[in-house]
Amino acid sequence: MGEKNIIILSAEASFARRVALGALVRRPVKPLLQMIPDFLKRNHEIKRYSKFYMAPRRLALEAALAILYEDDRGVVHSRIKQQARAWLESLTLHADDANDALAAMITLVADHYLKLLGA
């Protein structure tokens, strides 16, 4: 099962990089001297976007593995809500609606990952 985890996370990270590149690449190519700082800035933004994109997906994969191997769904869903709240508070976002939406998204992705892990 460890190989499937790596495949899932690498596919999600690849998707995050492609989305970030699609959002960042808007300008025509600049002269060589100006491309290097622009390239470094672009890489930084891609890594930053990927970090925020992957955090909920890692929580979802952990939840899917917990459901698959040991825990009850109710226990896992309450743990998801707590972890989502902690992650949002680390970003200084304290809205209950945002926490509920993030927990619902993580639950949905965890169910999807359960199907992938079971395949």
Image (cartoon, rainbow, N blue to C red):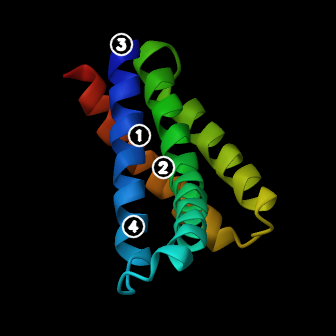
The residue identified by callout 1 is 110
* Tag 4–tag 3 contact (CB < 8 Å): no
Q: Nearer the viewer, residue 53 or 42?
A: 42
Based on the displayed image, in which of its 4 quarters is residue 98 positioned? bottom right
Q: Which mark is residue 21?
A: 4
Q: Earlier in the sequence, mark 1 or mark 4?
A: 4
Q: Nearer the viewer, mark 2 or mark 4?
A: 4
* Secondary structure of residue under mark 3: loop
Q: Earlier in the sequence, mark 2 or mark 3?
A: 3
Q: Earlier in the sequence, mark 4 or mark 3?
A: 3
Q: Earlier in the sequence, mark 2 or mark 4?
A: 4
Q: Residue at x 52, y 66 (%)?
A: 39
The crowd level at tag 1 (other Cα within 10 Å; few <14, some 14-19, many 20+) is many
* Tag 1–tag 2 contact (CB < 8 Å): yes
* Secondary structure of residue under mark 1: helix
The crowd level at tag 3 (other Cα within 10 Å; few <14, some 14-19, many 20+) is few
Image quarter (top left, top right, bottom left or bottom right) of the C terminus: top left
Q: Which mark is residue 106?
A: 2
Q: Earlier in the sequence, mark 1 or mark 3?
A: 3
* Secondary structure of residue under mark 2: helix
Q: Nearer the viewer, residue 36 or 9?
A: 36
Q: Which mark is residue 1?
A: 3
The crowd level at tag 4 (other Cα within 10 Å; few <14, some 14-19, many 20+) is some
**In the image, residue 25 lies at what x, y percent?**
39, 77
Which amino acid type corresponds to the residue marked 1 in the rendered image? Ala
Q: Is residue 104 left or right of residue 26?
A: right
Which amino acid type corresponds to the residue marked 2 in the rendered image? Ile
- Tally the numbered discs: 4
